[in-house]
Image: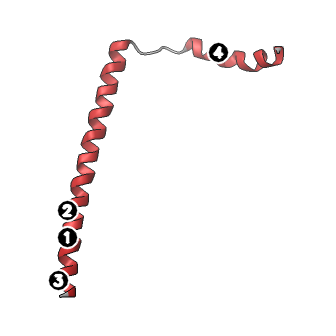
């Protein structure tokens, strides 16, 4: 069991050095990521819709 503790101890030591964010920082960063993700999803959805409309127009133009 000592060999396991010897292997894990460096990780525990490094985690003790980490400066974890405060609760307020965590909330602000979480909201920022959620808003950025939502905006990116909206942009991709708009691009997808426009591409679909353009392709539909081109198919109808050349097929009929």
**Position of 34 compared to 20: left or right?**
left
Give the residue at mark 2: 50
Q: Are marks 1 and 2 in contact (CB under 8 Å)?
A: yes
Locate residue 11: give its quadrant.
top right
Residue at x-position 33% and y-position 32%: 33
Q: Position of residue 37 (x, y in %)?
A: 31, 39
Q: Give the Cα distance between marks 2 and 3.
A: 16 Å
Q: Which mark is residue 54?
A: 1
Residue at x-position 58% and y-position 16%: 15
Q: Position of residue 29 (x, y in %)?
A: 33, 24
For mark 1, does the 10 Å Cα neighbourhood hold few (<14), some (14 to 19), or many (20 or more) residues?
few
Give the residue at mark 3: 61
Q: Give the Cα distance between marks 4 and 3.
A: 65 Å
Q: Nearer the viewer, mark 4 or mark 3?
A: 3
Give the residue at mark 4: 12
Q: Give the Cα distance between marks 3 and 1.
A: 10 Å
Q: Position of residue 36 (x, y in %)?
A: 28, 37
Question: Does dot 4 land on a helix, a strand or a loop?
Answer: helix
Q: Nearer the viewer, residue 56 or 33?
A: 56
Q: Position of residue 51 (x, y in %)?
A: 23, 65
For mark 2, does the 10 Å Cα neighbourhood hold few (<14), some (14 to 19), or many (20 or more) residues?
few
Q: Nearer the viewer, mark 2 or mark 4?
A: 2
Q: Is residue 29 above or below residue 5?
A: below
Question: Does dot 3 land on a helix, a strand or a loop?
Answer: helix
For mark 3, does the 10 Å Cα neighbourhood hold few (<14), some (14 to 19), or many (20 or more) residues?
few
Q: Is residue 35 above or below residue 3?
A: below
**Position of 14 compared to 20: left or right?**
right
Q: Earlier in the sequence, mark 1 or mark 4?
A: 4
């Amino acid at each position: 069991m000592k060999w396991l503790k010897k292997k894990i101890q460096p990780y525990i030591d490094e985690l003790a050095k980490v400066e974890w964010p405060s609760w307020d920082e965590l909330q602000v960063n979480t909201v920022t990521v959620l808003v950025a993700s939502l905006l990116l999803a909206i942009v991709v959805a708009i691009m997808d819709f426009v591409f679909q409309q353009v392709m539909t127009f081109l198919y109808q133009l050349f097929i009929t």
